[in-house]
Image (cartoon, rainbow, N blue to C red):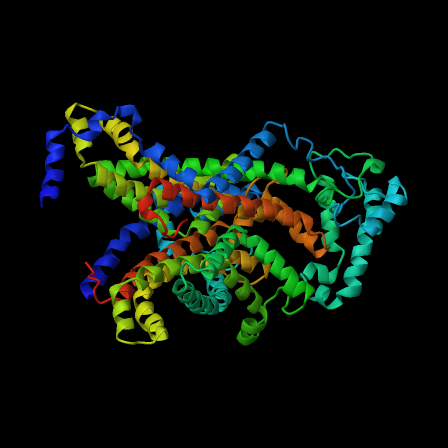
Amino acid sequence: MSTSSAVLSSPRSAPPAPREIPDHLSPGLWTLAWRRLKADRVGMASLAIVAAFIVMMVLSATGLVAKDWSREVGVNYAPPTFVGPDEAAAQAGRAGPATAPAGPTAASDFQSSVVDPIGDVIAELRGEKPAAAGEAAPSSSVDPLADVMKDIQSAKGAPGMTAAPAEARAATLPFGGDKWGRDVIKKTIKGSETSIFVGLAAAAVATLIGTLLGAAAGYYGGRTDDFLNWFYSVFSSIPYLLLILAVAAVLQQKGTMTIVLILGLTGWTGIFRLIRAEYLKHKGREYVQAADAIGASNGRKMFVHIFPNVSHVVLVQLSILAVGFIKAEVILSFLGFGVPVDVVSWGSMLNEAQNELILGKWWQLVAATAAMATLVTAFSLFTDALRDALDPRLKGQAGS
Amino acid sequence: MTAYIIRRLWQMVPTMLGVILLVFLLFNWVGGDPAYVLAGKISNQEQIDNIRRQLGVDQPYWVQLWIFVKQVLTADFGASWSTNEKVSHILATRLGPSLTVLVPLLVIETVVAIGLALAVAYVRGSLTDRMVMIVCTVGLSISILVYIIVFQYFFAYKLGWFPVQGWGDSFLENLFKYASLPILIALVVSIAPNLRLYRTFVLDEINQDYVRTARAKGLSENRIMWVHVLRNASIPIITHLMAALPGLLLGSFLIERFFSIPGIGREVILAVERSDFPVIKAITVYVAFATILSNLLADLMYKAVDPRVQLK
């Protein structure tokens, strides 16, 4: 009894302990969050990977890295060095530079290139897999050359190509080449520029819209809230992918900014609901009443007083959205509704790789997949760590 | 209960009108004059004028909106701009193939995901649990495109276990021959996120007092997990399933495209590629309506599974 009364009485006699600590030493939300994040090894590792990807994107965008990605440095479909040169391609190379197919070829070159390296592939297709070839897409069952011809014809129209002299082309590349002999690694780096930029920019747009509308709905309440809630329920009742495709159908011109807009304008609903709930919770608190008492305007209360207290929700949502949009961009570009054909992205690489895989050229598929899977895994782990650091109560709950 | 359903149905009206308005604004205002989109296909001024009159786009906007509302209510969206097929006929014939893939997928996926979630949650914190969660996280980060490309190449093209693509006329042939690989791929893709989610649902229940009580009175672990825990964990699971239902209809659209399955999802992609606005409009509006209705259904199921829930 005596000890407890002593404990109870001592703070009353002495001045409150926190007063003695100077204000600038008291750790704020962000300092505490950063400390928790630093203690999370998985979180820090994934942050480093995400940062490395973003640095790579910036370097590529400023032209310091992978500037010459469109140069045809290797032979067509140059295999990775650790696999060794392709026999058929090597023979074609030895036969003389004239038969080595160059990028934008004339019709005569086009004929010879059909005869040479791809002819072997077709023979292989016919010989080894007659049943499978018969069951394949109707176009290839009628004419097994059709797909290959299409590839070659599209190669003629391929933009930005600077054909290297045929004899200067390497038989193998560190991680292989695409169908025009461009280095897959450089292409992947160049593709990251589009994919990561679209993901981050679209997430920023969606977060901005969701935060502004959510803040207005939660703060003003009443009619504004009713209207914005109606707006929200309309948007969220259309399945997300369908909404994206519908907007893509309407916006005819393709471009990186178009796809940022499509994803941003359709993806704000989740963050709207969270921010609205946060503003509802905060608008009745004492500090907002105090701000009201000293005559702060609505905008000032919403964005100077309340916003810093909900910004951790915004940050986590931004991160979750970025992961989702990187994945969505890949699908849209794959389908051809995303970036224009002359812009390389991981989605367009996967689109090319789909046909290449049938020919046994797996490296472009692996490169694009590995880059994307690494980034997305790291980004989702980082999101989980960020959420745990900013809001430790949520620790262990299902993420993204 | 009846009063609740009627009130909820009444509350849906503004949302449905909103969907109609949104789709209308998107396609008739943002998308520009529909006649000019069509004009890309037909370049003859007289014909364009004809089409404008036929579509009613020479009328003021409110008349056009009324035409659209009537189209939605009568389910008569006219003919497709590309194939001239009736839109209602397109929807009716494409629904079957989609459901042939969707229904077995949903059943198998739910059973497998729940079973795995119970098992993984039971050994929570162990190496198995952590490994499964890591595999799920990594598996989630690989694009669905890669799964489809690789599985189609390997199992259909290389090994020849399944047809590469195609669709037949008989239901059983479709289900067992053509739909099996698409279902397998969709299963692999959708199981990772659902397993992660269901695991947290089970974990929420597994530490409850009633589990300890059941164990104390000597019930077998199987009975505890499959009867006591599952019954309680199924509440959020059912809500999640109902909410995911309409999305699934489209979620398989990549699979339908790759395997040439003539379903709703493939129709959406074809329509977007061809700027076939009536088809996209019809599908968007009806899928949105289905979503709104399935939200209500989810709430009603919620009540059926959990008697404590008060509908208000």
Horizontal arrangement in the rendering, residue B308 relative to residue A72 (left or right): left
Q: Position of residue B280 (x, y in %)?
A: 47, 52
**Is A159 positioned to the left or the right of A249 in the image?**
right
Q: Residue at x 79, y 57 (%)?
A: A122
Decide which of B181, B172 is in the foreground and name it. Answer: B181
Q: Is residue A176 above or below residue A15?
A: below
| Residue lying furthest front | A2
Furthest-right residue in this view: A95
Identify the residue shown where x is 54% and y is 72%.
B175
Picture coordinates of residue A27, whole percent (x, y) = 31, 31
Q: Quadrant of residue A73?
A: top right
A232 above or below A131? above
Picture quadrant of residue B224:
bottom left
Residue nearest the observer in this picture, B135 or B238: B135
Closest to the observer: A268 or A281?
A281
Tell me if residue B154 can be seen. Answer: yes
Note whether B108 is above or below A264 in the view shown: below
Can you see residue B31? Answer: no
**Disc count in the image?**
0
State which quadrant residue B233 falls in: bottom left
- Location of residue A13 in the rendering, given as x and y in whole percent from the top left corner: 10, 30
Q: Residue A372 in the image: state x and y as whole percent.
A: 56, 45
What residue is shown at x 83% (from left), y 51% (from top)?
A87
Q: Residue at the spot x=35%, y=60% of the render?
A: B203
